[in-house]
Image: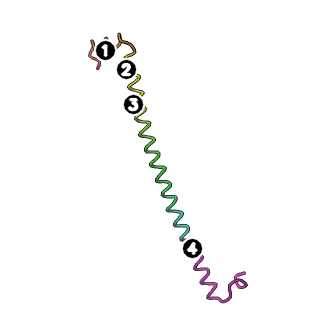
Amino acid sequence: MWKNIIPGRWMRRLAATILIILASTLFLLNLRRQGERAGRAAERLTNLEHTNHAQREMLDAAADRPRSRDDLVDRLRRGGF
């Protein structure tokens, strides 16, 4: 097949070398892009964990609040704050 498209042995070897270099370059560029994508996903996960932690703390604080004025007075008398 190559003999009909590219004449000469050294031309075929040059074409093969160029193709190998091109494929390697594209592979390395794709690795870089995948690494950047993984880094963004890790950052997104970290932000999500921080947000969930803050929401959990707010829910815990809301669950611990006094429900009525009487509960508030009882806590203040017992020194619960």
Work out whether mark 1 precedes mark 3 in sequence or the reverse, and give the earlier one. 3
Look at the image and tell me in which quarter the N terminus lies: bottom right
State yes or no: discs 1 and 2 in contact (Cβ < 8 Å).
Answer: no
Question: Tag 2: residue type?
Answer: Arg
- On the image, numbered disc 3 is attached to which residue? 57
Which residue is denoted by mark 4 in the rendering?
A: 22
In three-dimensional space, the C-alpha distance between marks 4 and 2, rounded to whole angstroms, equals 65 Å
Which residue is label 2 attached to? 65
Instruction: Determine if the magenta segment contains residue 12.
Output: yes
Within 10 Å of disc 2 (Cα), the crowding (few <14, some 14-19, many 20+) is few
Density class for disc 3 (Cα within 10 Å; few <14, some 14-19, many ≥20) is few
Please report the residue visible at 38 percent of the width from the left and 13 percent of the height from the top.
Answer: 68
Q: Looking at the rendered structure, which numbered label has been put on residue 39?
A: none
Q: Mark 1 = which residue?
A: 75
Q: Amino acid at mark 3?
A: Glu
**Mark 4 to mark 1 CA distance (whole Å):** 74 Å
Residue 4 percent coordinates (x, y): 73, 84
Q: Main secondary structure of the magenta part?
A: helix
SS state under label 4:
helix
**Residue 18 sits above or below residue 49 on the image:** below
Residue 2 relative to residue 38: left or right: right
How far across and how far down the image is residue 69, in percent?
A: 35, 12
Q: Are marks 3 and 4 in contact (CB under 8 Å)?
A: no
**In the drawing, does residue 43 fall left or right of residue 2?**
left
Report the amino acid beneath label 4.
Answer: Leu
**Residue beneath the point at 55% across and 68% down:** 26
Label 2: state its secondary structure. loop
Mark 4 vs 1, N-terminal side: 4
